[in-house]
Image (spheres, helix red, strand yellow):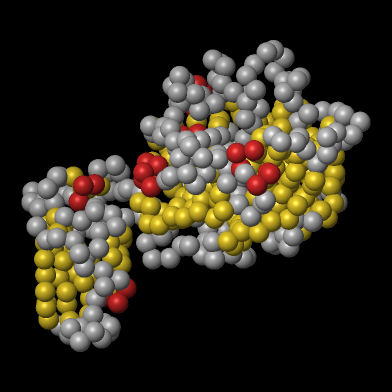
Amino acid sequence: MTLQVVSSGNILLPVPAPSGDWSNAANVGVSDFAFAGSSNYAYLLFYFSNTVFNPINAYWIRVDRSHNTASYQTLYAGAADEFWQPQIIRLSANGTHAFTFTNHRTPDGARHALFQKRSLTDGSLVSEVEVSSVGQVLGANDMDVATIGGVEYCVITLTDPFTNIRYLKVLNTSSMTVAVSKTYDPGHSTAMPFIPCAFDAAGNAWYAPLMWEGTPMFIRKVAVPSGTETEYTFSGDMANTSVAQLSFNAAGQMVITGGEAGGAGGNSLFTFDVSGGAPAQIKQVAVTPIQFDGINTLLPSPRFANGSTYFFSGPLGQIAKSDLSAVLDIGPIQTVNVGPIGNGNLDDSTSNPHRSGTIDATMWAVGGTTIGGANFDAIKWFNLNVSCKVTWVAQYPLGNLPDDSQFLRFRLRGFSGSIPRVIATDVVVETQFDAPASAGQTTITQNSDINPAGTFWTIEFHSHGKTTSQGNFRLSCGSDLTSVQPI
């Protein structure tokens, strides 16, 4: 199985460039993308200062995924002694609000860590609550949303770069109050980590407050809203690497991106069963990280929302299925991209309007449109085929479209004496199947992924009970049967 970029494009940032030129931008901050499940929109937060003059301005950007356009609202116009830095965004389950975290520096020099509820219509502020004592400079790491007992909660992890203390806050979004607050002090000097967090299906908030430091890696579970906390220590390779990203798939399994290439479990993806309390490893897949102009930057953990089954592993630069049955690198995106990329989020939701035909997911990012140009002047999208399909156009000689009596028969050949299997998974390949001619596409196993080597597909066109044409082909993901050459 391979990853293909079916199409790609740029949407110029709708925000006015500082002094008319994006090369004047400084102190740039870009949130992750939040994809709506009930509309065609995606949302992100953006702030920057101007090297010509200093104030930091903050913006709300809405992307119309159907028309590949973007609009904006100004959230805050900064001043020399006051500014706001929105850092992360998640959407409510009912599609009416966004939840954001923003750092606010007031004219008296104090810092305020604000959890905010905003209208999805225009990003306007509905309400906010301060989640720490005045004066703390906190950075938002990760955020997740879940409905527990009929109440929607947000869990957010935060770090204080001056004290090295890490925080987990659970917010009741109805009352806009802090329902649970946890603090972790490593008690010694340590690297400032990215702290992933996620809700499981039972409404527990999980987080990993410390990077791997040579002792077995651990993770903590917090019951919501009671606040009861339990710590679990990993065994196996996961005990020897950091938790870089943390999510739960539709089956309720914990999905982890492992960090630290130096650890035994570094550069690996994991799934765990947590139904018994302590995480029990289900699967581990080692990968080769893809270094690519910042798209592998550590991002908030992926969320399997709105029917998503694939996720982007961020620091490892892989796209993987939620059960790790397929892991693909993003090299093809690197091939087609022009200019730098600052971050990237995968939209594999059923609400993705780009998702049609051979397009199974879309990578969205903020970056530059030209090599050597501004790092941030456009929103970029890459439509991806993350399953292996072939396409065709079938019609009668007179141009009529096929009806229900026409179909294509695919027969795998060239494996005499062997059972054909997929190289990566050892799954037995289906050796014969039919597809309606009117479908125009079908999923297939490409010949290069089949053991033994040297297989090929015989494709027959059947019409009204007769085989009207056939040919032998070595097929790849994305092959077009109307142009591929027979062997």
Task: Tell me the quarter of the image containing the C terminus.
Answer: bottom left
Q: Is residue 81 above or below residue 147?
A: above
Nearer-the-camera pick, 304 or 389? 389
Q: Quadrant of residue 413?
A: bottom left
Residue located at (24% from left, 54% from top):
476
View extreme (top): residue: 188
Question: Could you tell me which residue is drawn at 64 percent across and 16 percent down?
Answer: 190
- The one of 183 and 200 positioned closer to us in this rendering: 183
Q: Residue furthest right?
A: 108
Residue 276 seen by the camera = no
Instruction: Please report the residue visible at 36 percent of the width from the left and 44 percent of the height from the top.
Output: 335
- Res 356 quadrant in image: bottom left
Q: Residue at x 63, y 26 (%)?
A: 193
Against 195, residue 99 (above or below) is below
Q: Residue 84, percent across and down?
A: 78, 40
Camera-side residue: 314 or 254? 314
Horizontal and vertical percent position of residue 251: 52, 50
Q: Can residue 72 be seen by looking at this rendering?
A: yes
Q: Position of residue 69 (x, y in %)?
A: 58, 61
Residue 96 position in % (x across, y down): 73, 62
Q: Is residue 283 left or right of residue 401?
A: right
